[in-house]
Amino acid sequence: MIVVAIIGILLGVAIPAWISVRKRSYENMRAANCVMIDRAKEQWIQETGQPATAEPTAGDLEDYVKTFPVDPSGTYQINPGNVPCVYVPN
């Protein structure tokens, strides 16, 4: 009985911490994906001679990103060249 109580207490502490770490890791991944999209956007603007306010599509950036990031719980909004990428949750 005591062993079960101790395991319950440990799980009560460990599960919220695990959820918090998982949430932070998704936020960091999304931020890194936006940085990658912004860098690809800058390359596209420079190589195609577009103005800094040009807005590329995901298809335009395919040559500059190995695999375009996909997130099932939201989308990445590709803004004009002078505006940073934004993650928009569903």
Image: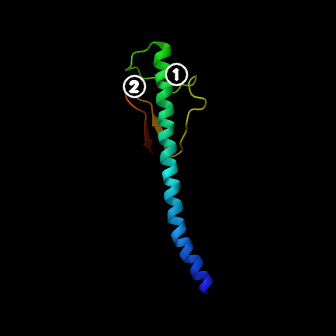
Count of numbered circles in the view: 2
**In this picture, residue 62 sits left or right of residue 46:** right
Q: Residue at x 51, y 63 (%)?
A: 17
Pointer 1 local density, CA inside 10 Å: few below 14, some 14–19, many at least 20: few
**Closest to the observer: 72 or 31?**
31
Q: Which residue is mark 2?
A: 80
Callout 1: SS: loop
Where residue 80 appears, as percent x and y from the top left, is 39, 25
Say whether residue 16 is visible.
Answer: yes
Where residue 53 appears, as percent x and y from the top left, is 37, 20
Single out the residue that lies furthest toward the top. Answer: 49
Q: Height in image: 39 above or below 51?
A: below
Q: Height in image: 40 above or below 2?
A: above
Q: Residue at x 49, y 53 (%)?
A: 23
Q: Which residue is mark 1?
A: 60
- Going by the numbered disc 2, the residue's amino acid type is Pro
Q: Height in image: 69 above or below 15?
A: above
**Closest to the observer: 46 or 58?**
46
Q: CA distance from mark 1 to mark 2?
A: 13 Å
Q: Which label number is shown at residue 73? A: none
Q: Earlier in the sequence, mark 1 or mark 2?
A: 1
Say whether residue 57 is visible.
Answer: no
Which quadrant of the view contains residue 70? Answer: top right
- Going by the numbered disc 1, the residue's amino acid type is Asp
Q: Quadrant of the N terminus?
A: bottom right
Callout 2: SS: loop
Where residue 82 appears, as percent x and y from the top left, is 37, 25
